[in-house]
Image: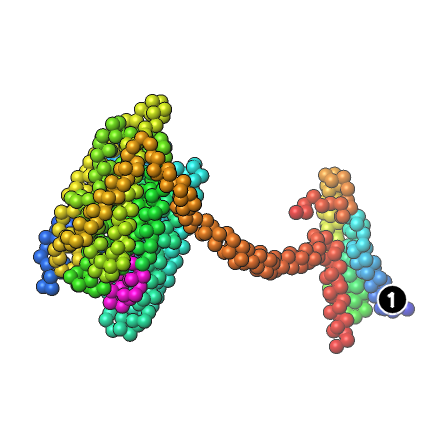
Amino acid sequence: MDYTILILGLPVLSFLILGIFGMFMKHRTAGIIGTASLAAVTFLSYLTAYNYFTTPRTADGTYATLVPYNFEWLPFTQSLHIDMGILLDPISVMMLIVISTVSLMVHIYSFGYMKGETGFQRYYAFLSLFSFSMLGLVVATNIFQMYVFWELVGVSSYLLIGFYYTKAEAIAASKKAFIVTRFADLGFLIGILIYGYYMGTFTFTPGEERMMQYSMMIPWALGLMFVGGAGKSAMFPLHIWLPDAMEGPTPVSALIHAATMVVAGVYLVARMFPLFSAYAPDVLHWVAYIGAFTAFYAASVACVQSDIKRVLAFSTISQIGFMMVALGVCTGMNPHEGGLGYMASMFHLFTHAMFKALLFLGAGCIIHAVHSNEMSTMGGLRKYMPITHWTFLIACLAISGIPPFSGFFSKDEILAACFKFSPVIGTIMTIIAAMTAFYMFRLYYCIFWGKENKELHEKHVPHESPITMTFPLMFLAFLTCVAGFIPFGHFVSSNGESYSIEINMSVAITSIVVALVSIALATWMYAREKQSFAEMLAKRFNKLHTAAYHRFYIDEVWLFITKKIIFRCISTPLAWFDRHIIDGFMNLLAWSSNESGESIRTIQNGKIQTYTFCFLAGAIILTVMLLLL
Amino acid sequence: MDIHILYYLIISTIMLFCGIYGFFTRKNLLALLISVELMLNATNINFAVFNRYLFPDALEGHFFTLFGIAIAAAETAVAIAIIINVYRNLKQILTDDITDLRG
């Protein structure tokens, strides 16, 4: 598996080439360089996956964990050192496939979407940087390497959200995303330091006796790491950056803010899962509660948003909540007894990446056609954009959990795992799944059916996108159709043994019925020309509707906390102390040396007569002293 | 009938301190030069007097006096030349006003 180094090497190479020489290239050349390197990475990832999963299992029925590269980067003590390397195990190989596939599709799609934009080369350079960082994150051999790449994806996300750097909202959004995630990463870093201090290593598998000795500290370390994961994965209340991150170009939203980077938190929890389940089951259950609340909150907000990318952003938050819940409800390592959620979460991550990227790319086509994000400018687009329409419908069915699309299979596993843990959580998650179906079909009908905005469409007739944009849609739609039939449990499961997915009939039927009812409701409410019932509801529950439209004022709460409490009560006094006490002391030193210099410098006035006078006076004083003593 | 050595020394001391006083207080370059000459001649007198009274058989003091006079002449020539050039270029010879080279 020596070629795996190229998976990381090619994107960084293309980033350097495009970053340094991109200005001298034509748009086309730059795009081809970026896409070609990603295509090679995709090929290598698939080859890695093929080789990895066709290697026979070890004696205990698991796939061996391979480490093709690992070199010591920063040694601290004998056992505590930061390494850089590549680690292949079922989930990292699965993530390689997800990232490279979605990234390649986004690269191809961007040819059409970003055509003629200034900074086209810069865009592709950043995409390469992002791909490199994300791939480095998933193959990390230790928690610290993961942290390094974790920050790198944060930076590339910042750069890409702020791609339109002349637009004030984009700059504000990029800063918000960076600061919020960076703030959460503080927790991650402290968690890593606690982990490193007590476990004596940064690897994912500390020694048994160290773990027994310091088992008190493991929940703290893992809990703090989860704070970092919650920031990246937009868990409540750190989700505020993700809806704003939609200011970036739409393919970027598809790649970073839907399919790959935002699931890094889920991946982190999955990576630390053995420790979570053995030493910190309480923390793990808290992950589930936070995930469930986030899923519910985001789903309710998604029901009333009018910007299509915002709806998709909240739907992403909600779906990541599902993955977190699935991990959190695990009670053991055995997939047959309480470890099912781990597999379900990874499966949902896999299928969600495909259909959510598809939804975002579809939304990109729509925005490309009508030049607006607002639902009011759309409606009745199905006859103008048949390919976008059909692929979007497939993705909507998948996310709603309708068989045979991929979302059904993974969501069914999640719900089964939830019901196994507690019927309450199971019921809540089923309700959220119903809400998902409702808001996705509300979105679908408002875009493709409903009342057409004739005025606008006559002025500028919407058109289907070029092949570079529709090909990724069709490819991802194909994956969405077939991904559910992958025997996923065979490859990834909580203890590594082969697990065959069984459809839990009672759960499956309930969730399908609930989803169909929600879809029917959405059809009745939104598929018609006049949406009188929806308007009536909005008027009837005016306060609730306004609050949900403003995302329940969580952003305002954060602003209040930062501006009124942190800035005013902590930062202002600190700034005063710094400006007056610290700076004052330094200014005093400078002032006194300046003054003493001023007073001495008159002696050195360049007049020989003064010098000789001093000389004589000195000589006389010395003589007198000699005579007297 | 000899004059006592003390009288010579009093004269030369007065001359020396006149020179020093002039060197400190005068601003005119020519006055400074005159003051320097006064000091030099005071020492010349001392050389001659000490030689004459303390070591009547030796001649070194007298020679030093002669050298001193020669050096004083050369020094005066050089100094006068400098002062004349300063005057030509700057139109003044008062030390307080010649500040062109001050940083």
Which residue is nearer to you in this view: B36 or A516?
A516
Residue at image location 24% in from the left, 67% down from the top: A278
- Up/down of A406 relative to A92, above or below: above
Which residue is nearer to you in this view: A565 or B8?
A565
Mark 1, residue position: B7
Q: Where is residue A542 shown, x and y percent of the image?
A: 42, 43
Q: Which quarter of the picture shows residue A103?
A: top left
Q: Is residue A523 shown left or right of residue A606?
A: left
Residue at image location 28% in from the left, 30% down from the top: A381
Residue at image location 12% in from the left, 58% down from the top: A498
Q: Is residue A168 visible?
A: yes
Q: Where is residue A368 shown, x and y percent of the image?
A: 31, 31
Which chain does the residue under circle 1 lie in? B
Q: Where is residue A212 shown, x and y percent of the image?
A: 26, 73
Marks counted in the figure total: 1
Q: Where is residue A581 shown, x and y percent of the image?
A: 59, 60
Residue at image location 88% in from the left, 67% down from the top: B3
> What's the magenta region?
A268-288
The quadrant of the image that shows the C terminus of chain A is bottom right
| Residue A171: in magenta span | no
Which residue is nearer to you in this view: A157 or A538?
A538
Main SS of the magenta part reads: helix
Type of amino acid under label 1: Tyr
Q: Residue lying farthest top?
A: A458
Q: Is residue A182 visible?
A: no
Estimate how packed mark 1 is, as few (under 14), some (14 to 19) or many (20 or more) residues with alpha carbons within 10 Å.
few
Which residue is nearer to you in this view: A377 or A161?
A377
| Residue A271: in magenta span | yes
